[in-house]
Amino acid sequence: MQAYRLTAGGGIDGLTRVELPDRTPGPGEVVIRVRATSLNYRDLGLARRSASAVVPLSDGAGEVIAAGEGARLEVGARVAGCFMPYWRDGDVTPEYQRDALGGSVDGVLAEQIVLPAQSVVRIPEYLSFEEAATLPCAALTAWNAMFEATRLKPGQTVLLLGTGGVSIFGLQLGVAAGMRTIVTSSSDEKLERARALGAHVTVNYREREDWERAVLDATGGRGVDLVLEVGGVGTFANRNVC
């Protein structure tokens, strides 16, 4: 089977197609024929500073083509993987983080991957492989921030910074849950698309450098209940105002 592998110290230019043996499942494992993968900002960062030869990317979806003893998933099942395949409950430990796909262990940019059966989920029939491949990192990050860490409720307000994957999933989740959503972007075209997805308020932070004040104005000075913070050092100080 074919895969792509980063070379240690080679950066993105070190991404090379390689031939690897077909995968075989152990007890409780499944072999997945990868049909689609998605690219996250994390993947680019890891590729640029690649320290070891590893198959990149954390997010993918496909179908089970072989199942080990006790795997409890049949051949042909449509599934998506998990960002940290061995973190099933409890607090995140360094060991779980170490085993995140595409970091220090092989990821999903290959024709076949092996994962613990307990670390994959079935894909609903209404989702394509391409759609399902975007869920493990971006969608779950947004879900965790909005409904696990803070447990937002209908009627509350969430600020979504930018129009990257996490923010757009946050927008869709917020609209579906009956929240008021505010989206920032430097692109009027992207803001128009955000409004089409249900954004209640949009702010172009190129035109309005004090975008945090615009958010305050839009909320009558109250501010928001949650900022889905993805900007880091570039936005952290501003978001404390709103």
Image (spheres, helix red, strand yellow):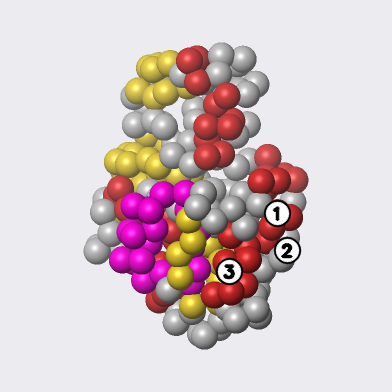
- The answer to whether residue 21 is seen in the rendering is no
Q: Is residue 16 above or below residue 143?
A: above
Contact between marks 3 and 1 (CB within 8 A): the answer is: no
Q: Residue furthest front?
A: 207
SS at mark 2 in the image? loop
Residue carrying label 3: 215
**Of the residues shown, which amino acid type is indicated by label 1?**
Phe
Occupied quadrant, residue 197: bottom left
Other residues around mark 1 within 10 Å, as few (<14) / some (14–19) / many (≥20): few
Contact between marks 2 and 1 (CB within 8 A): the answer is: yes
Other residues around mark 2 within 10 Å, as few (<14) / some (14–19) / many (≥20): few
Nearer-N-terminus badge (3/1): 3
Numbered circle sitting on residue 240 = 2
Which region shows up in magenta?
Answer: 181-199
SS at mark 1 in the image? helix
- The answer to whether residue 150 is seen in the rendering is yes
Q: Magenta stretch containing residue 146, yes or no?
A: no
**What residue is at 71 percent from the left and 66 percent from the top?**
241
